[in-house]
Each structure stands twice: as structure tokens, then as C-alpha cells.
Amino acid sequence: MRNTSSNFDHNFKYGFYLAGGIVFLIVAMMIRPFTVVNAGERGVVMQFGKVQDKVLGEGLHFITPIVTSVKTLNVRVQKNTFESDAASKDLQKITTELAVNWHLDPVQVNKIYQQVGDDELIINGIITPAVSEVLKAATAKKTAEEVITKRTELKQEIDSNLRNRLSSYGIIIDDVSLVNFAFSPEFSKSIEAKQIAEQEAKQAEFIAKKATQEAQADINRAKGQAEAQRLQRLTLTPDLLQKQAIEKWDGRFPAVMGGNGTLPLININPSSLSSSNQSQ
């Protein structure tokens, strides 16, 4: 009987402790005396709803249940695309698609949450209207054609102005990309017609330039030939021609057909014959 009673007491204590441990874990999970801040997040600490100066980094943190609560905010780089209408300097309607990479300043998340709210309120309440206003102000300084031809300059201006505007809210702009421009159908047709006209003008200019170069080449060749002929006339004297003929002579006289066969053709100078007869 003692052994049975002893075993019962032991099992009872074991069951009591086990049940107590389970109850403790359940209560602990319900009241959450700790909080976990995941990677890429920061924790905003509030006591009875009041935002505290302390910001929790990544990891496990113990807090006072009921009294303290923690709101986590994403501090990773986020990308949002915005589309906004604006008027150019020459009053053309331009619809611009803009991609913005941004993130929250990790050390200011408590102030951001206190002044603005969570990510959704930050995007809709702060970033979207700022993008629209900055885009309209930058686009109004350029004509519709300059929006296309000076795209890099426009992008840099929007990027700089947006950074300055949102920095006071603890929002850091990493990069701005001009994804696409859309113009009215009438303006798009005029742009297309202008591009075609410019291409045709360049083609005509190329053809005219090529013809001019060919004509100049012909003139240069003609001048060269004329100069060569002039120099040749100056250098070809009778003595030089006789000398060249002698150098090219192969020692044979030209032959003619006579009554008795082929005879050599000898050019006899009459003046030389008369002089020889007188000497005799």
C-alpha cells in the first residue's frame, strides 16, 4: 500500500508540475513578455501607446507585457511605380511612369511612425503626392521634345528634388527611373513626321555631299592629267627623242621589197652625199 501511495504522490506531483509548466507557457504566449524583430526591420517601442525614443534592432527583445507594445517597420529598399500626368512648357500633356527605390532611415523609424504611420500611409500620404508635385514642376520647365531629348537631365532634376523633399520625413531616395512617357496621339504623329523628315533630309544631304566629292575627284584627276602632259611637253626635246630612239634601236634597218628580193631601207641624207662628192 505504501508503494502504491508513493507512486501516486510522485505521479501527481509530476502531473502538477507539467500542467503548471503548460499553463505558464500559454500565459506567456498570451501576454508576450518578449518580441522578435526580423531581419530588415526595426521596432518602434510604445508604452501605453506613446512612442518612445528607443528603436529596437533585429533579434529577440524582452518587454513589459501589457505596458509595452512594439510596431515593426520595414527598412529594406522598396520599389514603387507611380504614374502621373503633367504639362510641358509648350502645354503638351505628358503621362509619365516613374519608378522610385526608397527606404526608411533606420534610426528615425519611431519619428516616422509617430508623424506619418506605417508603410501604406507613408506611400499614399507622403511619397505619392511628392512624386506628382516634383514631376510636374520639372516637366513644366521643358518642352515635350526636350522631355525626350534631355531625359537624363530631367531624371537628375527629379531625383535631386525628390530626395530633398522627402529627407525631412526620414525617407531616403535611393534611385529614380523614368520608365516611360506617353503623349497625345496628335503630338506622337507630329514627332513621327518630324523624325521621317529629318531622316529624309539627312539622306538628301548625304547624296549631295557624295556627288560633290565625286565631282571634285574628277576635277582633281583632270588637273593631274593636264599637269602631267604639260610637264611632258617641257621635257621632251628633239635631242631627248633621238636619244630614246637610238637606245631602243635593235641594230636592224627596216626592210623593203625590191625586184631582186628584200633590201634594207637606209635613210640617206642628201646633204651628206653632196659634201662627200665635193671632197672627192
Image (cartoon, rainbow, N blue to C red):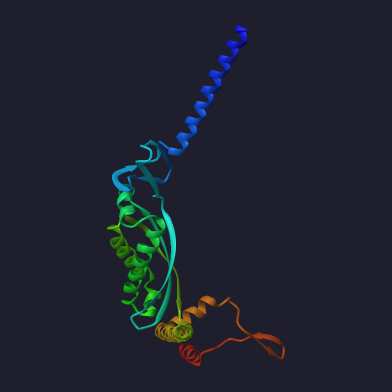
Q: Residue furthest right?
A: 260
> Residue 262: image x %, image y %?
69, 85
Asked if one can make out residue 92 in the rendered structure from this viewpoint, the answer is yes
Pick the front one: 254 or 144: 144
> Residue 221: image x %, image y %?
45, 83
Q: Name the residue at 36% across, 70% down.
A: 132
Picture mark count: 0
- Asked which quadrant contains residue 96, the reply is bottom left
Q: Is residue 230 above or below residue 28?
A: below
Asked if one can make out residue 238 in the rendered structure from this viewpoint, the answer is no
Q: Is residue 151 above or below residue 144?
A: above
> Residue 124: image x %, image y %?
39, 63
Q: Is residue 111 above or below residue 80?
A: above
Q: Name the residue at 51% across, 78% down.
A: 246
Q: Name the residue at 43% across, 75% down.
A: 95
Q: Residue furthest front?
A: 1
Q: Is residue 228 above or below residue 4?
A: below
> Residue 250: image x %, image y %?
58, 76
- Asked which quadrant contains residue 149, the reply is bottom left
Pick the front one: 97 or 202: 97
Q: Name the residue at 56% across, 14% down.
A: 9
Assign the N terminus to one quadrant of the image: top right
